[in-house]
Image (cartoon, grey):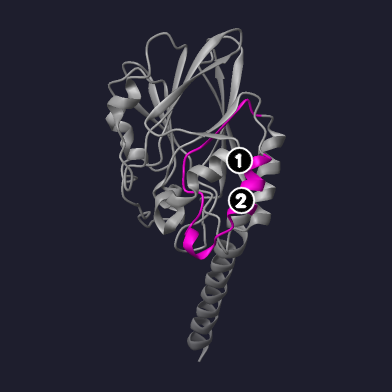
Amino acid sequence: MKSFKRIAKIVLLLMVLIGLFIGYAFKVEPTRLVIHAYDLNEDKGQSVKVVQISDIQVSETYTIKQLNRLVEKINQLSPDIIVFTGDLFENFSTFQQKQQVTESLSNLKATVGKYAVWGNRDYGGGAFKIYEDLLTNSGFNLLKNSGVNVTVLNDKKLFIGGLDDGLLGYPDVDQLLSQMDDSFDYKIVLMHEPDMADLLKDTSINLLLAGHSHGGQIKIPFMKTMTTSLAEKYSDGFYTINKSNGMQLYVNTGIGTSRIPARFMVPPEISVFNIHL
């Protein structure tokens, strides 16, 4: 009888722990927002602040209200440059809040500019019909196998390029590279899927910024974290792509959620790069 009661208590404790885990994963962690800040090229002079967000995935579970709070948080960081590495809606066909999202993203403030690329969900769910228009009306420069020359900090030249989505778009590395030369003091390229970084490993790009992976979204200790297409090799944080020239990739773990509206041990992330030039 005593052993039965002991087993019953253990089972009850496990049920409570599982319930707490589920409640935290669905209700708490997706609403958290962590800021990871890094200094790059530190042996140089003044820095330009680049703020990256990715995979917002606006939906019934990531609302306009949450998006507005995200915008406020980013503005508090006083960025020089804001970059968005794709996946604005989770599924635009089921949550068509184009005007509200446009108004919210329009409130993002960057002293130099705002830049974005296409993600796979920006093509899917009918989003391809509105994505470019929405981003443009929100003040973003949407880069598609293209780049821009940005002058910052005492006439230093910064290249910001962007590859088209690797799953549903048509990424063209040669077209992107044709717009980049050695006159730039620092080169950043945006992409949605991180595994595409290997396509650029033999170039002179300094920093690659990606998303897509959600960092696995749910990390359970001692269990293998789930991966997704073109985010199997690189999933979160920094990676050295080319040791000889110091090229780095940073994979942002995203803001919203995909498929399951839960996160565990992978809170929503804003990444900040103070790049010295």
Of pointers 2 and 1, the one earlier in the residue sequence: 2
| Structural crowding at the residue carrying mark 2, measured as other residues with C-alpha within 10 Å and reported as few (<14), some (14–19) or many (≥20) | many
The mark total stands at 2
Which residues are drawn in magenta?
79-107
For the question of whether residue 220 can be seen, the reply is: no
Amino acid tagged 2: Val
Give the labeled residue for mark 2: 101
Q: CA distance from mark 2 to mark 1?
A: 9 Å
Query: Farthest residue toward the bottom?
Result: 1
Amino acid tagged 1: Ser
Give the labeled residue for mark 1: 138
Closest to the observer, 171 or 218: 171
Q: Is residue 103 magenta?
A: yes
Residue 144 x, y percent position in the rendering: 40, 34
Q: Residue at x 54, y 10 (%)?
A: 156
Q: Residue at x 63, y 43 (%)?
A: 105
Q: Secondary structure at mark 1?
A: loop
Q: Is residue 250 magenta?
A: no
Residue 106 x, y percent position in the rendering: 65, 41
Q: Classify residue 51 as left or right of residue 127.
A: right
Residue 43 x, y percent position in the rendering: 52, 10
CB contact under 8 Å: marks 2 and 1: yes
Closest to the observer, 63 or 16: 63
Q: Classify residue 65 as left or right of residue 4.
A: right
- On the image, which quarter does residue 207 sit in? top left
Q: Is residue 93 above or below residue 183?
A: below
